[in-house]
Image (cartoon, rainbow, N blue to C red):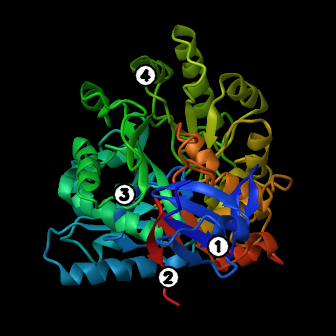
Amino acid sequence: MTAPTRILTNGKIWCGLSEGFAEALAISGDKILAAGTADEIGAMAGPDTEITDLGGKLATPGLNDAHLHLHFYGMNLRQLDLRPHAGVTTVEKIVEMVKEVADSTPPGTWILGRGYDHDKIDGFRHPHKTDLDSVAPDHPVLLTRACGHTCVANTKALELAGIGHNTPDPFGGKIGRDPGELNGLLWENARFPVQQAQPSPTADDWADAIEAASTQLLSLGITSVMDPGIGLSNGEPELRAYQMAHKDGRLKVRVAGTLMGDMEKNILDIAYAEGLVTGVGDDMFRIGPVKIFTDGSAGAGTAWMTQPYYNDETNYGVPCLTPEQCDELVMKAHKMGYQMAPHAIGDAAIGMMLDSYEKAYAAMPDPDRRHRIEHCGWHTPEQLERMKAMKVIPAGQPSFLYFFGEGYFMCLGPDRPHHCYPFKTWLEEGLHPSASTDCPVTDPDPFPCLYALIARKTDKGNVLGDGQQLSVAQALHMYTYEPAYGVHDEERKGRLIPGQLADVAVFDTDFFEMDAPERILDAQCVLTIRGGETVFERAA
């Protein structure tokens, strides 16, 4: 047997849910060669084998975020950080941050921000158009709520977008109005004119964003992601940016790229003409599923439900497609050979997606297509049975439980939040659920995600869905193997077994020996290996 190029030893190496633990790992080139005891693996060493002493630390397969907007995250790193966890808990603070940028940039410069959560703002309110006008009357301003489905714009931005008081609500969207004036709020499809009025980033801008974001992810132990929206902002340049970043070595994590195939946000025909269908690519950049939007978010009150919201009995959310449009888009992508990964959070949206899937499978059966539902927040027991029958994969976000759980009680009442994102049920029913952050909707940090899977607690410590708690091994399984399975990559990565890619994350905390699950929130990645090579090492 060829001597390994690298050996990781003197550690607690979790190889996978079924595989359990090893003391040492042998790597040959970019693949795993063997796992076993320190003595077994040590005996394989040759004169040129690099030996890495893990110092007793926990190592796992490289983490894989199954739904992370990598290129958007990179762009957001250049914008105002309005997240509550960054200290933004008042409208006054938001206004102060906007004023600072307005005072230091020429008039007409766009001011963009992301991450505020009105459920965690004093007074439980969004910023108002007049708040922004007071400090930036000559700068167009657009601030995006954490969920990404609601924005607030100032007067200058609305004018550039051609939105006035008499502008009708678009289908799948809503324009916020106060008596006699617009309030600046834009929900779902109503956001698009303001976004389109902004200068479009170039492919090189997007490539820079991809490099910055992927470099940051390596410091968290994340070696793979599915980017669920290539083409969502300004179309084809986003696809070209990924190709450019990959070619130039600027892409630092492995990406399964989801292509937009919606009514307006659509690069499907361009990709298909170039042969870029699901599965095409290599181990760094591979074409994944096709994305469409069917509704919004629960926190914004736009997830499409069959029951009204607790805090507004006239509101059932916002459908972003008609059933006929949904059928058409799904059938087109299905017949082209693509996997689907639509956004659907409310049970009404989930039901519409399942209807479309049933029609597509009836027209062209494919038992291993692995169509997904991204988020899949609130479904009915009957819908669960339909998902099982078609082997539909639910791709939920545990970080939503942690960061947004308290807000769910405000908008959906005391009972319905406990039925959201049932990861344990999904796992036990064999649906291959994955874990993710939907970054930049929430921070890419995997530790709140893992904590929510294990403890099912919000950031205030309240239990959300008691009985859905998972073991540490099950939680890691959803952050390693299942995301790979969700994009047909389970034979290449997700476990530390012979022949799989040598992607490894090493942590300063032993998740399996914690005296309380809260300990995981303070954990850090200390070493990240991608393809057998160190790509991140934390300074002592």
Give the residue at mark 2: 538
Instruction: For marks 2 and 3, give the CA distance.
Output: 25 Å
Q: Amino acid at mark 1?
A: Thr
Q: Is residue 401 visible?
A: no
The tag earlier along the polypeptide, 4 or 1, is: 1
Q: Which class describes the residues within 10 Å of circle 1: few (<14), some (14-19), or many (20+)? A: many
Tell me what residue is drawn at x 52 percent, y 67 percent: 6
Let me know if residue 485 appears in the view.
Answer: yes
CA distance separating discs 1 and 2: 18 Å
In the image, residue 236 above or below residue 28? above
Question: What residue is at 19 percent from the left and 57 percent from the top?
Answer: 204
Q: Residues within 10 Å of mark 4 (few under 14, many from 20)?
A: some
Image location of residue 530, percent across then percent down: 47, 62
- Horizontally, residue 443 falls left or right of residue 128, namely right
Nearer-N-terminus badge (2/3): 3
State which tag comes first along the sequence, 3 or 1: 1
Question: For the residues carrying marks 1 and 2, which lies nearer the camera in this image?
Answer: 1
Q: Which residue is mark 3?
A: 72
For residue 511, side relative to residue 146 (left or right): right
- For residue 337, the mark is 4
According to the picture, the residue beneath numbered tag 1 turns out to be: 9
Say what amino acid the circle numbered 4 marks.
Answer: Gly
Is there CB contact under 8 Å for labels 1 and 2?
A: no
Q: Please tell me which residue is depicted at 56% across the width and 53% down the height of the picture.
A: 1
Of 432 and 147, the residue lying toward us:
432
Helix, strand or loop under label 1? strand
Badge 2 element: loop
Q: Nearer the viewer, mark 2 or mark 4?
A: 2
Q: Earlier in the sequence, mark 2 or mark 4?
A: 4
